[in-house]
Image (spheres, rainbow, N blue to C red):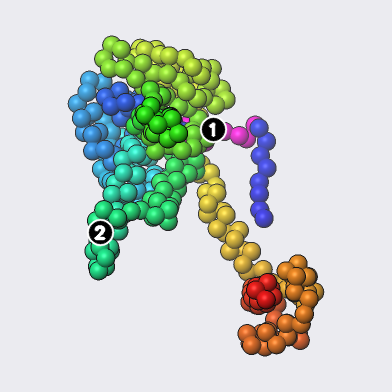
Amino acid sequence: MVYKIVSDEEVKLRNVKILVWGGSGTRKTEMAVRFLPDPLVIDSEFNARHVKDMPGVPDFQLVETGEVEVAMEVVRDAIAGRLKAKSGSKVQTVSIDSIAKLKEIKTDAQMVAKDKKAQSSNYYDPDKVMLTLQDRGKISAPLKRLIGMVAMAGVPWFVVVAREKNVWTEVPDPGNPNKLVLTKTDEVIPDGINNKYEFNLIFHFSGLGKDWRCTVDKTQGAIGTIFPVGSVLNEKQFAEKMELLRAYANDVRREEAPDMVEEGVKALQAAELQPVVFTKTDLAEYKTRMGVGQSIGEDLQKANLPVNPIDPTRKQEYLAVVDMVAARLQAN
């Protein structure tokens, strides 16, 4: 394995990753385009156009899509420096607005595909078409990948916008204390965000007009001197602190962090290329562990497995024969 050690003198800030969440109309979309340089908005809500003519909002670029795969492609191109801002420089800010909407669209598409497939069955019942855990995995996997790409840096500013949703909890049914029912609470959380560890800074926007407020939910490192956790800011205070944040991050090094998923894939591929070491002793130890004391030579021959010597590249087949014999012994 290859790795690199750098001294603290060489360490530079790669990027700043911000999560902005809140209720409808709390100016989440506006945040990235008003306060951060050379922004590009990936808009799945199809609302960013309304920000364009607001006073003081500079030029920004827009990609409207409901497909998470398209969003991932835009992020890849931004990380690689292939996207240019209207100023002619590389895009400095990428805002994803919003994760919950991308998930909603992906879920609807999966449900429609599932329904169409079910219609070909003689037992089709639209009320019984449901998403399985495997289906939901197919929905969540690219969304997790998209959030993971934010950590790869390559772009100085990443903003992820999330809606606000209420927390539901189980409480005893007033009519039947032995039964639990789901009840909506007043607590709110970011919708579609299961992991906050990816972000250096988390803002919760609330209120409208003069009642607008930003609550700082999380900061990392020296950013906390600008945005202390728990502080509540009005519009003027927030704008001033965003200027300080931009000055702090002025020397962001535009370098791409390792893609940990890709690194993991490479490691697995390298492991697969390593020669498999499986000996007769290993087979005997596995037999003992599975409680098989008798000879399995006849069973191995039936499975077309060589006995002396054994084939070290067919380890799983040998183990499967032992498992079969162990199951047979237990049945008897």
As rendered, which of 120 and 329 lies closer to the eye?
Answer: 329
Q: Residue at x 68, y 72 (%)?
A: 330
| Position in image of residue 20 (x %, y %) | 39, 28
* Left or right: 243 in relation to 198: left
How packed is label 1: few (under 14 Cα within 10 Å), some, or many (20 or more)? some
Q: Which residue is mark 2?
A: 125
Callout 2 secondary element: loop
Q: Residue at x 35, y 53 (%)?
A: 131
- In the image, which is nearer the foreground, mark 1 or mark 2? 2
> What residue did someone put label 1 on?
13
Counting from the top left corner in percent of width and height, residue 99 is at 36, 39
From the viewer's perspective, tell me whether residue 55 is left or right of residue 14. left
Q: Which residues are magenta?
A: 9-16
Residue 114 visible (yes or no): yes
User: In the image, what residue type sits under mark 1?
Assistant: Leu
Mark 1 or mark 2: whose residue is earlier in sequence: 1
Relative to 28, say whether 208 is above or below. Answer: above
Q: Write down the quadrant of residue 268 in the picture.
A: bottom right
Q: How many marks?
A: 2
Q: Residue at x 67, y 88 (%)?
A: 301
Q: Position of residue 243 (x, y in %)?
A: 41, 19
What is the quadrant of the C terminus in the image?
A: bottom right
| Amino acid type, callout 2 | Asp
Whether residue 319 is visible to the viewer of this picture, yes or no, is no
**In percent of the image, x 56 and y 22: which residue is there?**
222
At mark 1, the secondary structure is loop
